[in-house]
Image (tube, rainbow, N blue to C red):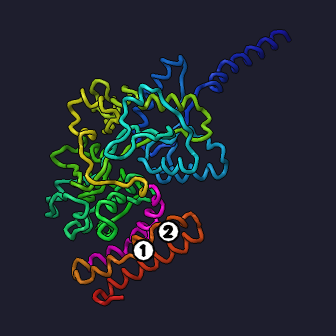
Amino acid sequence: MMRKRLANTFVFLFFFILVIPCWCQEKIVIISPHWEGVKIEIGRIFQDYYRKVKNTDIKIEWLDQGGSSDDLKYVESLFQKNPETTGIDIFFGGGLDPYLLLKEKGYLMPFKVNEKIIKEIPAQCGGIPNYDKDYTWYGIVLSSFGILCNKKVLEFIKAPIPEKWSDLAKPEYYGWVGTSDPRHSGSMHMMFEIILQANGWKKGWDTILGILANTTSIPTSASQAAKDTAIGQTAVSLSIDSYALAQIEVNGPENMCFILPEGQTVINPDCAGILKGAPNLKNAQMFIEFLLSDQCQKLLMYPKNSPGGPKKYSLNRLSIKPRVYENCSEITVNPYKKEMDFSFDFKLASRRWSLLNDLVGVFSIDCAGLARKAYKRVIEDPSRKDIFFMIPVKENEQDFLIENWKDPVFRNKHLNKYLNFSTQKYKLCIMHGSKKK
């Protein structure tokens, strides 16, 4: 009997020794649209750093719903179920606009990083803030937006390398343009916003409608649009710099190039922030400060296998800290030395985030097949273009729509009306091109 009790005790102690460390292991939960390479490289060095500082391991749980817009909707839905916490510590990536929206709704937790770090980061770049004055979010890297080109395919279809956004709406690119759905991708949303602000309401929408009609498919992922250009399925695509540079690194600059439309692009922070009710708050704070450390900033920007650079994947990001550019000869673009092309209204961009996404959807994406057929008729007979480019919303109607867009009844009523308008317009353009409404 004594032996049996001792055996049971040893079994219990053995189980206790094995299980307790699992219960006690430190953890952090991060929702992020960043691609796998970012998660692997940052995860690796943060876990090493944490082990050195805390003398224990930390588990990183990465979540992603498919893109920054989808991640934002997911977080909002969790807060609607439980206003106190989502069970997630950090929202990481997706540009700037999601953080303005999260802050407005009270979903971000203020955290002031070490004063030394703040002093190393300029308050803004090109007129756009690099971090929140209330310290609810921080820009981790800077992003530029442009056009990824497959030189071989452009040569094959006898089309020039585009120089501006509106070039992508031209007939010579019909069927060869890559983009993605801004309702799922924050970076693609940003490019449509840039096009609209850089060109003005009328010309901006003409450009957006022409670009979308020049596509053959519209995936949900912006990274997929860049991959499609790399494999030759498209000749050009709208792209954030990191996706474009990753494809150029793999396929070679002799085959691909990345164009920043002159006078029509901006430098935008790609941010991170701690979510309200973060269950692992201390770890979340430590992670934010680590992202802004020189070690992590070099990892994000330096080429693969260079001193301080990543081991497996080049991440191709631009550091938020000016001094990181000083000792990296491989990086030829310094956003802090670049003049802002135009005055970008980031507050307007934030206010109409949902509205713009929905309008792009009902004006073109949700009736993409008809839009492509109609645009082909426009190319054949330019007299039809006035019908094709009609939209049912005037610029001075924006404020009214924005103010009421959160009302689901109002929103659905207008979306149905606009989709019906677009569908009928494209049908009219196809069947009776020269006839005006």
Q: Earlier in the sequence, mark 2 or mark 1?
A: 1
Task: State the image coordinates of residue 75 (x, y, percent, origin top left).
Answer: 56, 49
Magenta stretch, main secondary structure class? helix
Q: What residue lies at 16% left-to-right and 64% top-to-bottom?
A: 157
Residue 111 coordinates in the image, percent (x, y):
53, 34
Does residue 412 appear left or right of residue 81 in this picture? Answer: left
Quarter of the picture holding the C terminus: bottom left
Side of 394 where 13 appears, left or right: right
Residue contact between numbered discs 2 and 1, judged by CB atoms under 8 Å: yes
Bounds of the magenta segment: 350-377
> At x 32% / y 83%, what residue is drawn?
430
- At mark 2, the secondary structure is helix
Q: Quadrant of residue 149?
A: bottom left
Residue 116: in sight, yes or no? yes
What label does residue 401 carry, if any?
2
Q: Amino acid at mark 2?
A: Leu
Residue 243 in view: no
